[in-house]
């Protein structure tokens, strides 16, 4: 968008906000939302300025907070969190809680759960509890995540949840599992790798590659059938990822070849051979 157009949109937003008084209502929010969507990040920054400042009335800020929840931009999350944590008006804070809940993801859940731990006001606690419950109800992934994190504490429940996640998660939800790759529970770490391989997108390649390199070397040093089974599982998951994104195979081929050279007649050696054959054919096509 041309600079002159951005300046025009920013001017219209400034005029609209400053002339809203204590009213505004839906017509105000709809017009403001239209301008913000048109102007993009520059106009979002202008809204952040109003949400977190004291330049306009609380009633106007409540409308801005409500609008921020409908737009759902990343730019609004931290400002909304600031209002929840330090807002001077409880109704404004409640409105920010409702807007954060509309994001319906892990970030929103973390913000609201942290606020609930700090809150000492019953009304805000009630609003936070309802908002947290709404996110968990609307997002089955967040509701199921604690079962996955049980890992070795409940292997059956973990395996069931892992199978579901490998089928249903969006790439955005899959990226959540980057944080669990180095979890203290081996099952959780390796399960997170599988999820990234089955449901992750191109953006997770670095984490997939580094985990495979590091853990295949560690497992090579371990003896026994358990270590061999774990390597076979890693190779199978990596194969799935590279089938979806064969452009990354040339970068990992030297590591795969070096690992295969140490495989002998093992099951994971056969899995590596199948991977090389499959991906070599795909990259030559």
Image (tube, rainbow, N blue to C red):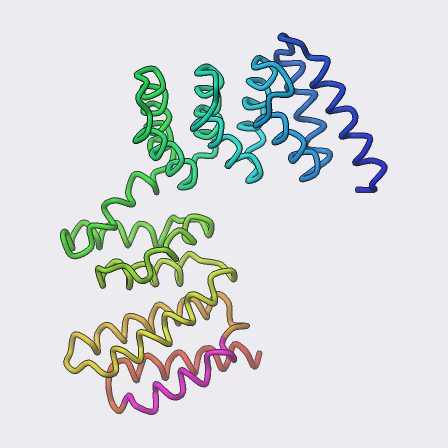
Describe residue 253's horizontal placement relative to residue 137 as left or right: right
Residue 185 in percent (x, y) is at: 21, 60
Residue 4 in percent (x, y) is at: 85, 37
Q: Count numbered badges in the picture.
A: 0
Label the magenta part by its dominant secondary structure.
Answer: helix
Closer to us: 38 or 53: 53
Closer to us: 42 or 246: 42
Residue in the picture at 55% in, 24% down: 65
Describe residue 138's horizontal placement relative to residue 5 as left or right: left
Describe residue 8's horizontal placement relative to residue 126 as left or right: right
Is 161 rendered above or below residue 100?
A: below
Is 213 rendered above or below residue 160?
A: below
Residue in the picture at 24% in, 72% down: 230
Residue 92 in percent (x, y) is at: 49, 18
Residue 46 in percent (x, y) is at: 67, 31
Q: Look at the image and give the residue range highlighted in magenta.
A: 249-263
**Would residue 219 be counted in the magenta stretch?**
no
**Would residue 253 be counted in the magenta stretch?**
yes
Residue in the picture at 40% in, 51% down: 176
């Amino acid at each position: 968008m041309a600079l002159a157009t951005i300046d025009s949109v920013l001017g219209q937003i400034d005029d609209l906000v400053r002339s809203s008084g204590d009213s505004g209502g839906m017509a105000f929010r709809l017009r403001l939302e239209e301008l913000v969507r048109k102007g993009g990040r520059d106009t979002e920054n202008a809204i952040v300025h109003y949400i977190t400042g004291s330049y306009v009335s609380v009633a106007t800020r409540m409308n801005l907070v409500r609008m921020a929840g409908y737009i759902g931009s990343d730019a609004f999350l931290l400002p909304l969190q600031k209002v929840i944590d330090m807002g001077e008006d409880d109704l404004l804070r409640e409105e920010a809680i409702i807007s954060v809940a509309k994001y319906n993801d892990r970030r929103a859940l973390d913000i609201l759960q942290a606020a609930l731990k700090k809150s000492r006001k019953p009304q805000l606690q009630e609003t936070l509890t309802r908002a947290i419950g709404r996110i968990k109800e609307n997002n089955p992934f967040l509701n199921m995540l604690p079962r996955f994190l049980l890992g070795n504490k409940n292997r059956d429940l973990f395996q069931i949840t892992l199978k579901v996640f490998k089928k249903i998660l969006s790439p955005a939800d899959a990226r959540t599992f980057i944080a669990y790759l180095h979890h203290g529970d081996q099952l959780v770490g390796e399960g997170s790798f599988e999820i990234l391989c089955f449901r992750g997108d191109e953006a997770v390649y670095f984490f997939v590659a580094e985990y495979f390199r590091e853990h295949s070397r560690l497992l090579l040093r371990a003896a026994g059938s358990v270590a061999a089974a774990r390597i076979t599982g890693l190779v199978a998951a990596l194969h799935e990822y590279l089938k979806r994104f064969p452009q990354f195979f040339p970068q990992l081929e030297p590591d795969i070849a070096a690992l295969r050279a140490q495989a002998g007649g093992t099951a994971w050696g056969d899995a590596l051979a199948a991977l090389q054959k499959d991906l070599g054919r795909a990259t030559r096509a």
